[in-house]
Image (cartoon, grey):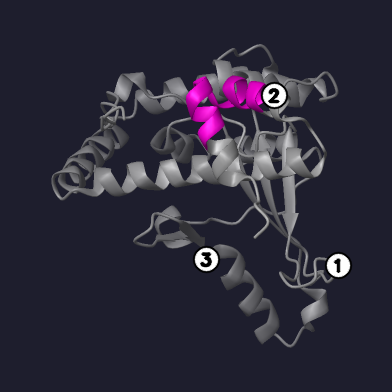
């Protein structure tokens, strides 16, 4: 059996190396409400209403398994209900995940989920809450040009449209902000403390679990569609950069077996 090697976490970027897709830079760029609106309207391909200030540290909490819990939608809904409005009239809420990888391996430009009953998928809450995963790596010719340009910028760094050039200009402006530079350096120190406490192992395990969940869903979907074994193995090797041995292992692991 081959001995597995533990991967090292990537070195933290210097402030000058930050791009729009880095968490810190993304947060600062999106503080510009008009630019934030432009990005959201491009991703959703629909008008966006009033933007409210959401502080990131209050918008998310992190559990020990590394999964983010969204609090802003919950808080908005409770506030709405406390004003005497009926549950069915909850305002529509969308949670966007902008991905530089295909989270579910189906090459869809976006994956939209709503709240449904686990026991009976035909039952939905119809509460207007959506979780949307934007797959910036999708290969499709059916995207609106503005959205394709934004996806290309996020995945490849190519600023070829008015919106992406506006984002790139905002990125450069953030890099000139000394206050934010100091803030980023402090965050790096905190990150280093987490590494010393062994948090890098938890992060790595979380990333591996998410990857394996995606592989499992991909395999089971293809099996349900009646796709043959060799085609599934070929797609696994291509989509997830797996060796033949790894692809076969996952296919065996995630293929349902009758008892």
Q: Position of residue 22 (x, y in %)?
A: 43, 32
Question: Seen from this angle, which residue lies furthest front?
Answer: 259
Q: From the viewer's perspective, is residue 154 above or below residue 198? A: above
Q: How much space separates mark 3 and mark 1, taking CA atoms? A: 27 Å
Q: What residue did someone put label 1 on?
A: 122
Foreground residue among 184 and 94: 94
Comes first in the chain, label 3 or label 1: 3
Q: How much space separates mark 2 and mark 3, taking CA atoms? A: 44 Å
Q: Position of residue 200 (x, y in %)?
A: 26, 43
Q: Is residue 105 left or right of residue 4?
A: right
Q: What element carries label 1?
A: loop
Comes first in the chain, label 2 or label 1: 1
What residue is shown at x 48% (from left), y 35% (from top)?
A: 26
Q: Give the range drawn in magenta.
A: 233-249
What residue is shown at x 54% (from left), y 16% (from top)?
A: 157
- Determine whether label 2 and label 1 are within 8 Å by CB: no
Q: What element carries label 3?
A: loop
Q: What residue did someone put label 2 on?
A: 230
Q: Which of marks 2 and 1 is in front?
A: 2
């Amino acid at each position: 059996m081959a001995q597995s090697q533990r991967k090292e976490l990537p070195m933290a970027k210097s402030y000058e190396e930050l791009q729009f897709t880095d968490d810190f830079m993304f947060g600062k760029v999106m503080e510009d409400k008009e630019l934030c609106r432009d990005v959201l309207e491009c991703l959703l391909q629909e008008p966006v209403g009033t933007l409210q200030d959401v502080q990131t540290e209050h918008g998310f909490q992190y559990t020990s398994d590394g999964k983010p819990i969204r609090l802003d939608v919950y808080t908005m809904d409770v506030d709405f209900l406390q004003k005497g409005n009926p549950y069915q009239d909850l305002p529509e809420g969308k949670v966007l995940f902008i991905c530089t990888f295909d989270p579910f391996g189906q090459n869809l430009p976006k994956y939209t989920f709503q709240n449904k009953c686990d026991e009976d998928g035909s039952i939905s809450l119809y509460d207007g809450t959506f979780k949307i995963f934007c797959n910036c790596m999708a290969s499709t010719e059916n995207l609106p040009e503005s959205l394709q340009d934004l996806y290309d910028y996020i995945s490849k760094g190519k600023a070829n449209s008015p919106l992406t050039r506006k984002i790139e200009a905002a990125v450069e402006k953030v890099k000139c902000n000394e206050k934010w530079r100091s803030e980023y350096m402090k965050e790096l120190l905190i990150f280093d403390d987490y590494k010393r406490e062994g948090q890098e192992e938890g992060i790595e395990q979380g990333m591996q679990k998410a990857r394996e969940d995606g592989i499992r869903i991909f395999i089971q979907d293809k099996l349900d569609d009646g796709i043959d074994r060799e085609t599934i193995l070929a797609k696994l090797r291509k989509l997830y950069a797996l060796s033949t041995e790894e692809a076969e292992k996952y296919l065996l692991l995630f293929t349902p077996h009758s008892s």
